[in-house]
Image (spheres, rainbow, N blue to C red):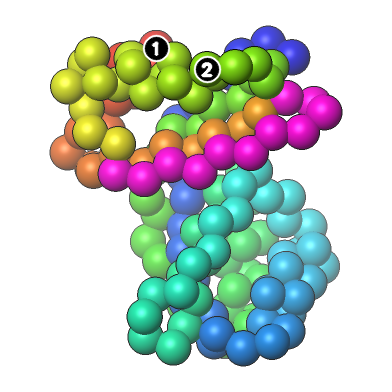
Amino acid sequence: MAEKIRRADYYDIHAPDKPGEGARVLGALKEAGVNLLSLTAFPDGKGTTQVDLVTENADGLARAVKGLGLTLSPKRQALFIQGNDRPGAAAEYFKKLADAGVNIHAANAACGPGGFGMIVWVKPENYQKAAKALGV
């Protein structure tokens, strides 16, 4: 798999923190034909779970979320990286951003037989600088 770095739009929702809610949300996305590039979920300390969603089907996402009675955040931006898994893959990108003076606000990565994927969030005021440092 060739390395692929792209600008990614993402959205978040806040869903009730209770059993079955993830299945309900993901089932609705499946029914709407929404393919996710990335999903990150974590408790927000308010009795709900924040779910960050990266997809190329924003319209389908909006329809599905509305049908669930949840609120979709405004569009935000992150950087999405895919490539062959190897020791230090994430470190290479972190170094490029550090060398450009960009602080990483958050990141999430996973790997499997097809390679690795990583989403990197930076503060909005650093987004263009980060994108340039990564060549996108």
Residue found at x 46% / y 74%: 43
Specify start and end residues of the magenta stretch as a single range: 105-115
Quadrant (top left, top right, bottom left, bottom right) of the C terminus: top left
The x, y position of residue 39, in whole percent, is 60, 54
In the picture of the structure, the residue carrying the numbered disc 2 is 88
Give the amino acid at mark 2. Gly
Residue found at x 69% / y 33%: 111
Position of 81 compared to 111: left or right?
left
Q: Is residue 80 magenta?
A: no
Specify the principal SS of the magenta part: strand
- Position above or below: 30 against 20: above
Residue found at x 23% / y 13%: 99
Give the amino acid at mark 1. Gly
The x, y position of residue 74, in whole percent, is 37, 61
Quadrant (top left, top right, bottom left, bottom right) of the N terminus: top right
Q: Which mark is residue 5?
A: none
Residue found at x 64% / y 16%: 86
Q: Is residue 114 magenta?
A: yes
Q: Callout 2: 10 Å neighbours few (<14), some, many (20+)?
A: few
Give 63 or 52, whichever is nearer the viewer.
Answer: 52
Q: Do the CB atoms of the residues marked 2 and 1 lie less than 8 Å apart?
A: no
Instruction: Answer whether residue 134 is visible to the viewer in this image.
Output: yes
Give 116 or 61, whichever is nearer the viewer.
Answer: 116
Q: Callout 1: 10 Å neighbours few (<14), some, many (20+)?
A: few
Instruction: Answer whether residue 58 is visible to the viewer in this image.
Output: no
Q: Spatial distance from mark 2 to mark 1, Cα to Cα?
A: 19 Å
Q: Which mark is residue 135?
A: 1
Position of 114 compared to 81: left or right?
right
- Position above or below: 3 against 61: above
